[in-house]
Amino acid sequence: SKEFETLGFYISDHPLNQFNSIFKQFNVISFDEFENNTNILSSNVACTVLKVQEKKTQKGNSYAIIKFSDLSSVFELFIFSDIFEVNREIIKEGNSLMLTLMKNYIDENKNQKRINVKKIILLKDIIDKPIKNITFKFKNIVDLKGLKKLSKKDAETVVKVLLEEKERTILFQLKDKRKVTNRLLNITNLDKNVLVQ
């Protein structure tokens, strides 16, 4: 946040890069793509909060104008009172979020549009949430040793393995559940072997 505030861009790394392993899973696209593609009316966008301006309506309800940054641009959105009040605790400068956006066109030529935020989730909660079922695909039996990094403590994940070695294909399930989160997959590089999640 301080890098952006001072220079207008991030020097070390964009905060979203630590979450990019889950973007495909949740069909996350850039805000530019969502805004400019007339065929996309609803999508998930990952972004980091840069600035929050809280305002009040004439009736006294709180809403906010928020400046966000994703990996390709900086943009502003209005968050109306019902969504803002429910998510007030996570809409903080520096937090990385996933927004579910809806787009409505006001005119027939699709030149004027209204973008509404329907849902807000803290990306940290998604990446640390246990995965219920997962299937890994390996080409070599030696690569299976990477599964040793998956702990049985506090385990909730059913793990299946598809081994395609030479001319044989074997599918099996580990006897015990393992503790698997998207963050762990990212750290251990096992995310490259995920077939189904």
Image (tube, helix red, strand yellow):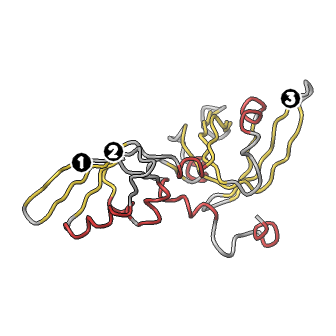
Residue at mark 1:
173
Give the CA distance from mark 3 to mark 2.
45 Å
Residue flagged by tag 3: what amino acid is it? Asn
Camera-side mark, 3 or 1: 1
Residue at mark 3:
61
- Answer left or right for 128 relative to 92: left
Q: Which mark is residue 20?
A: none
Residue 116: where, in percent of width, then height? Answer: 67, 36
Q: Which of 63 and 125 is in front in this view?
A: 125
> Considering only vertical position in the picture, is 70 above or below 3?
above
Give the CA distance from mark 3 to mark 1.
52 Å
> Considering only vertical position in the picture, is 20 above or below 173?
below
Quarter holding the N terminus is bottom right
Residue 139: where, in percent of width, then height? Answer: 20, 65
> Considering only vertical position in the picture, is 156 above or below 13?
above
Q: Residue at x 76, y 52 (%)?
A: 67
Q: Which residue is drawn at 29% across and 55% down?
A: 136
Q: Which residue is drawn at 65% across and 54% down?
A: 96
- Answer left or right for 170 relative to 143: left
